[in-house]
Image (tube, rainbow, N blue to C red):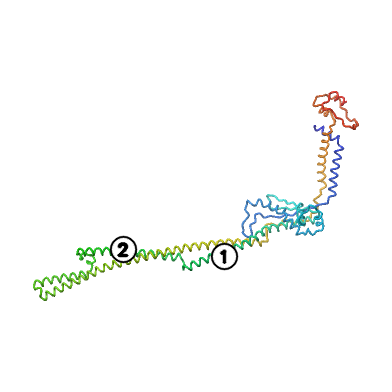
Amino acid sequence: MNLTQMFEVCWARRALIALILLAVVGGTAAYSLLKSKTYVAETSVLVDAKNTDPVTGNALPQQMQSSVQATQADVISSHTVARKVVDRLRLAADPAAQQDFAEDGDATGTIEDWLADRLLKKVTVRSTHDSNVINIDVEAGTPQAAARIANAFADGYIQTTLELHTDPAKRQNQWFDDQVQSLRVALQNAQQRLSQYQQQRKIVGTDDKLDVETAKLNEISSQLVTAQTAVNDADSRQKQMTQALQKHQLEELPDILGNALLQSMKADLVRAEGKLAQVEQRYGKNHPQNVSAAAEVQTLRNKLSVEVATVKGSIDQTAQLARQRAVEEQKALDAQKRKILELRQQRDGLDVLNREVESAQRAYDAAMQRNNEVSLTSRLNQTNIAILTTATPPAKAAGPKLLRNLILSVIAAALLAVGSALTLELFDRRVRSSADLLDLAGGTALPVLAEIRGLNLSRPSHSRHIDRKPTAVSTLQHAT
């Protein structure tokens, strides 16, 4: 069916089309005139997405700022905000609302929840990605009611946003109070253990004392080396003394040669022996001078032997004292080493306790700081949201819009009427032009001899079915 055939069908069924147009447009006009007027009030709020936290001073991460507007729009259109509007305006106390709630068979829950759900159907939240302003549109039956509900939604949104920040902080505050208390006890216990450890071991400054004891250890080590050197020297002298006694060469010992008294006694002995030799040459053995000289020589020899024995005893005593001192220095060194090891062990234990105290102190300080932040947040009464414009009662009604409804109804009725006419034509096909005859002839190229228009032929009471493949004769007859 081409455009001309469709036009002919619409013209032939113009009565049906006119009836549908009249019904739809008339019904729309009647609905628009009889429907009560509605008013839309608008308020707008500004969300400062880049605002810093008033407690911590931290700014919102850049990657989260894009989702702020969508989140805030969802909060405005939430059931919680609508419930706050119902409570703020005391809509549940309205007798008309109570009657509507009682008559609503599908109503469940409380009247406040029912009213909140109805309010949300009349609220439109508009926001854009490149703006921090959110618009709230509220539809109501009167201008005053629309403005009042719109402003109540803005106030309820701000209150809900504030509660979303403070309520979790209040719960966290109690938890942090318990944690701070337990961390304080842990810190006190750690400090007490440290004090007891210092008192038991009488520790004042482990590092200073360890440095002093280490210096003492170095000094004792130096003295031990000196004592061991003295022992080696005494052993060498004692060994030389023993060898000289065995060889009867005491005079060659360094201690003998360096002893002035022995050298003097040896000189006296030599002079006495020389004098004795002279007396023996002059006098006999029993001569008094000879006896006197011999006695003097013997006395000097005895003194020399005694002095040599004294020197030998001194060497032995020096060696013994050197060995004894070396042993004492070794014992002192060992004792000092044990003392230093003990101090180091005490310092290790003290370091462990100090680290426990420092760790407990850091945990306590961190928890205390966070507790203060949460406590301040729980008492916060400011948000990053501000009302940009307050809703005022609209001067004109937002609906129903008669002209718009009529235009839309005409368009819809025209489409419906034309569609209905074409649908009826498909079920009850009529011959309205020569093109229809050619279509019914199955595309056979038959000549059209004549076409008579303007005849007012009465339509038979029964439907006439036309053969889908008529002959050329019947076609021509019907055309004439």
Q: Position of residue 41 (x, y in %)?
A: 77, 54
Using the image, determine if residue 130 lies above or below residue 437: below
* Residue 219 visible (yes or no): no
Q: Quadrant of the C terminus?
A: top right
Q: Earlier in the sequence, mark 2 or mark 1?
A: 1
* Number of numbered discs overlaid on the protein picture: 2
Label 2 crowd (10 A; few <14 / some 14-19 / many >=20):
some
Q: Which residue is mark 1?
A: 185
Where, by quadrant of the figure, is residue 321 drawn? bottom left
Residue projecting furthest to the top = 473
The three-letter amino acid code for the residue at tag 2 is Thr
Res. 474 visible in picture: yes
Picture quarter with the N terminus: top right
* Amino acid tagged 1: Val
Q: Which residue is mark 2?
A: 229
Left or right for 106, reference 240: right
Contact, mark 2 vs mark 1 (Cβ under 8 Å)? no
- For marks 2 and 1, give the CA distance: 60 Å
Place residue 245 in its image quadrant: bottom left
Camera-side residue: 410 or 261? Answer: 261
Instruction: Give the secondary structure at mark 1.
Output: helix
Q: Is residue 219 above or below residue 408?
A: below
Residue name at image x 27 percent, y 63 percent: 236
